[in-house]
Amino acid sequence: MRRRSAEPGSDGLSARLRAAVCRLLNAAEGAEIVRPVPQVAVREIFRTFWPYARPYRGWIVVSVVLIAVAPAIEGAKLFMIKVIVDDVLVPGDIGPFLWIAPTLLALTLAGGVVSFLDGYLSTWVGQRFLLSLRASFFRHLQTLSLDFFERRRLGDVVSRLTSNIAAIESFVISGVAQLV
């Protein structure tokens, strides 16, 4: 009785599998399986999604202000450390430390509060924005004809909807804050 080699590709199944993978890879290299998404201008993106963010524009302004205040507080803390070094440590006089320490503590607490409020507010605004966006998308899906759903697989529609909203979510939650 002859034994087959344990090497991959020595039997017919592995050869057929390799051939199928090669055909798929060649098809992927030679032809477009999925059409590329067209590029969209940033102005068009804002024009499309601003109606969903409009109810939160006051909170967005507050969030932007908090984003600007946080580095200012960090700069003030660094300045206070400079004052400690220049006015307390170098001359060896502990007197100014009595007003510098509470100021530094207050700045640290203010920085923590501002950081918390900024994170909470930006997350709240972003999630409310996405909730209204999802509600609008699902409302639109419910108005589509049954013929639309017959021509498409349900998994494709749901997958595209959730992946697109996830991409918008990552842009809104992290992209806008990084932009500012």
Image (cartoon, grey):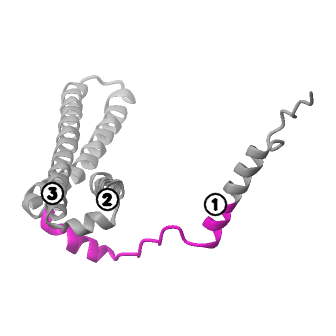
Q: Which residue is mark 3?
A: 60
Does 158 sit left or right of 55 as displayed?
A: right
Above or below residue 40? Residue 153 is: above
Label 1 crowd bin: few (<14), some (14–19), many (20+), radius 10 Å: few
Magenta region's main secondary structure?
Answer: helix
Q: Secondary structure at mark 1?
A: helix
Q: Quadrant of the N terminus?
A: top right
Q: Is residue 62 part of the magenta span, yes or no?
A: no
Residue 157, numbered circle? 2
Q: Secondary structure at mark 3?
A: helix
Residue under the image location 17 percent in, 58 percent down? 138
Q: Which residue is mark 1?
A: 24
Q: Position of residue 14 (x, y in %)?
A: 75, 45
Residue under the image location 28 percent in, 39 percent down? 77
Q: Position of residue 81 (x, y in %)?
A: 33, 35
Hey, what amino acid is under mark 3?
Ile
Q: Quadrant of the C terminus?
A: bottom left
Magenta-highlighted residues: 23-52
Which one is nearer the viewer's eye here, 110 or 164? Answer: 164
Q: Is residue 47 part of the magenta span, yes or no?
A: yes
Q: Nearer the viewer, mark 3 or mark 1?
A: 1
